[in-house]
Image (cartoon, rainbow, N blue to C red):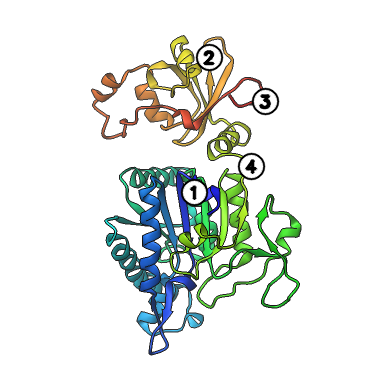
Amino acid sequence: MRVEIQTATTLVLKIGSSLLLSQTEDDTYGLNVKWLAAMAGDIADARTKGQKVIVVTSGALALGCAKLGIQRQDLNVAQSQAASATGQIELVRGWQEALGAHGLTAAQVLLTAEDTEQRRRYLNARQTLNALLDVGAIPIINENDTLATQELRYGDNDRLAARVAAMVSADCLVLFSDIDGLYTANPQDTDTAEFLDVVEDVTAEIRAMAGPSGSQHGSGGMVTKLQAGEIAQSAGCHMVLASGRAFSPLTALAQGARSTLFRAHANPLTARKNWIASTLQPAGAAHLDAGAVRALAAGNSLLPVGIQSLDGNFKRGDCLSIIAPDGQEIARGLSAYASLEAGLIIGKDSKAIAALPDVKQYNLERTEMVHRDDMVLMTSPNGELK
């Protein structure tokens, strides 16, 4: 198995529709229960090793069409949403039963593009996923096709899986598909197609190698897998593209099955801090006392008690410029509070905050104003990381 999978603290596994479905005697499609059970065994092995695992799964639409006796190609948007709602129940039940056989708990999470792109919803989704991982559950994620409109959806789970991997700062994303990696051309069409073991960057030349979806059930293709690779690499997350045709595909990788690695150039935390330092524009400022400056220098989070005053009208998740008593910007970070709520708690310790009459109404129970993982200490005006 690739070392990037073996050493990952958090694994995101994307399962394509063609892997989950099997043809029934009446020429419709149902869950491939045997494959699902073997995949659950792989997940259980990863959990035994101490790895956190998230599953991004396709298949709801195809299962719903089979259940309702309708053809996918004939559906309008509303009918597709109805079919997805029908199939989602069977899909999650299958995962629940397969994982439950190993003593694991499945948790359904439905996301839309807005959940990964709008800051507040992104933070809420991230918090929920991290909470599920912390209690040992296996989040089973699918796009919320029932509610997402055509304009506000990903339309494929490859990119959704990459966004989820970035959201939780995963180390490695594995896309299990019906192809064992990236080739210079479609190997079914030409004998001269060459297999690529490692992709360092998704260049224009690499993009030119992509073709359409090879499955009647899936909505993605090599194009969306390359897009997922770009998203993952920029987030400091390795991505492995591999075939999931074999039972227990993680075990197959451990035994030497072929795959393509899209290698990340930084770890997730470094990539995230680079993004905070160089991409985001501060929406406000927090002015600290000397004790808070010392605490940050020691590697601690920014607590409300160390903040003397605030500038700006900012929302939860916005970037804050963090200012020392001498007026120098010493850090930037993502605020856990909007400016209204933050104004109620600055200068107060945890006991004083807990005693506030509005603590429940304004959800003032988060310990940090800016968590250290969401903060970059600045050693130069250009935002050099420390």
Residue bearing mark 1: 6
Residue nearest the observer in this picture, 261 or 134: 261
Labels 1, 4: front one: 1
Residue bearing mark 4: 265
Dot 2 or dot 1: first in sequence order is 1
Please, what secondary structure does the residue beneath circle 1 have?
helix
Q: Amino acid at mark 2?
A: Ala
Q: Badge 2, how many Cα within 10 Å: few under 14, some, many 20+?
A: some
Q: Residue at x 38, y 90 (%)?
A: 26
Residue nearest the observer in this picture, 355 or 42: 42
Q: Amino acid at mark 4?
A: His
Dot 4 or dot 2: first in sequence order is 4
**Residue 382 shows which numbered tag?**
3
Is 94 situated above or below 124?
below
Q: In the rendering, at what x and y percent does residue 131 appear?
A: 34, 43
Labels 4, 2: front one: 4
The number of numbered discs placed on residues in the rendered structure image is 4
Q: Badge 4, how many Cα within 10 Å: few under 14, some, many 20+?
A: some
